Amino acid sequence: MGLFDFIKGQLIEVIEATDFSSEMMVFQYPVGNNEIKMGAQLTVREGQCAIFVNEGVIADVYGPGRFTLDTQNMPVMTKLKSWKYGFDSPFKAEVYFVSTRLFTDQKWGTQKPIMMRDKEFGIIRLSAFGVFAFRVTKPEVFMREIFGTLSTYSTADITAYLRRMLVSGLADSIGESGVAAIDLVNQYDELGQAAVKKMQPSFEPLGLELQSVTIESISLPAEVEKAIDTRTSMGVLGNMGQYAQYQSAEAIRDAAKNGAGGMAGMGVGLGAGVQIGRTFADAMSQNMAAPAAPAPSSSPVSVPCQHCGAPMPQNAKFCPQCGKAPQVKTAGACPKCGAPVTGGKFCAQCGAPLSAACPNCGAQVTGKFCPECGTPRG
């Protein structure tokens, strides 16, 4: 092999990156001690960009496409090298390929619970997790601020830092939203969008764009979840009086099925049945009895019917429920015809006087015998 063949073997004529993994963000092309031939072909695929670095200084940046390297399309490198137009000699430079595709399914989660003040439960702790997506939008900024001159750089090298930023911004978004803890499940999309809007200004100085934040779950403390379950159960049960009736009826049924033998078991079952019956009756009366509305002061006085017990006006001649006439209390019987007497001095049937002086003691007699001495009325 001659000297010319050796020099020709050291020249790089094609530059491209085909070994990008799904999580690789930066790949340094292995130039080594070789030189790049002026007029070499540079191929940049979709989702990539190429950065040329000259002695630690970022030179030219290329987007997707196929380029022939010469002084015309390498303006910054030409200026840094002080090349004259038409320069045709090999040169040395570092070449980095940066992935600009969207990196999805990046996990995030709270290492420690987030403190939150809730209007219903007070101060509570929340735990959350989900995924987020981002991409490199300014490769030169990303190189200058993050990966520097590392030969490779992957999402694992930066997601821990981005995750902490994201959790902090999400905690602020939840606190500022004012949404009750019990309603957070209905606000996952809105909270994710609020986190993107809030955290994007923090991603831009890194040359990155936060594309989306997805909340998969927000967990409440065990005691808060228990309180929510209790409240949910009460809402499902609805009328507590009816629930008490149902429970009492179930208890009576179970007691009836109790097969305890012997008189002792029978006595226990009977006592339990009586007690359950009382509980059932109390629940029924509390649930069904409605408090009577107070009668207005202008309404007539009502009295119970002597036959059916229904309320009726005091001076009514017939009961509005059973239709029977009320019984009139009598003061006695007429001593002459025996007709009932409701009052007055004379009988309403025969006109006989109702009272007279006792012929023995002189007391007033309204019946057939004197109430003082028992002498028959004359």
Image (cartoon, grey):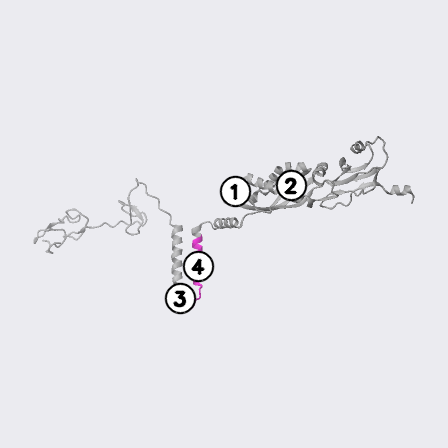
Alpha-carbon span between mark 2 and mark 1: 26 Å
CB atoms of marks 2 and 1 within 8 Å: no
Residue 208 appears in which quarter of the rendering? top right
Picture quadrant of residue 277: bottom left
> In the image, what residue type sits under mark 3?
Met
Task: Return the disc, 4 or 3, that comes first in the chain's sequence.
Answer: 4
Numbered tag placed on residue 213 in the rendering: none
Task: Determine crowd level at label 4: few under 14, some 14-19, many 20+ residues with C-alpha closer than 10 A.
Answer: some
Q: Mark 2 belongs to which amino acid?
A: Ser
Name the residue carrying label 3. 266
Corner quadrant of residue 268: bottom left
Picture disc at residue 212: 2
Instruction: Say which of 90 and 13 sits in front.
Output: 90
Residue type beneath disc 1: Arg
Q: Position of residue 151 (x, y in %)?
A: 75, 43
Residue 373 colored in magenta in the image:
no
Q: Nearer the viewer, mark 2 or mark 1?
A: 1
Magenta region: 243-265
Residue topped by disc 4: 251
- Left or right position of 13 against 130: right
Percent position of residue 62, x then y: 77, 36
Say whether marks 4 and 3 touch (CB < 8 Å).
Answer: no
Overall secondary structure of the magenta stretch? helix
**Viewer-proximal residue, 47 or 274?**
47
Q: Nearer the viewer, mark 4 or mark 1?
A: 1
Q: Which residue is mark 1?
A: 117
Res 210 visible: yes
* Distance CA(mark 1)–CA(mark 3): 57 Å
The picture places residue 88, in percent across and down from the top left corner, at 86, 34
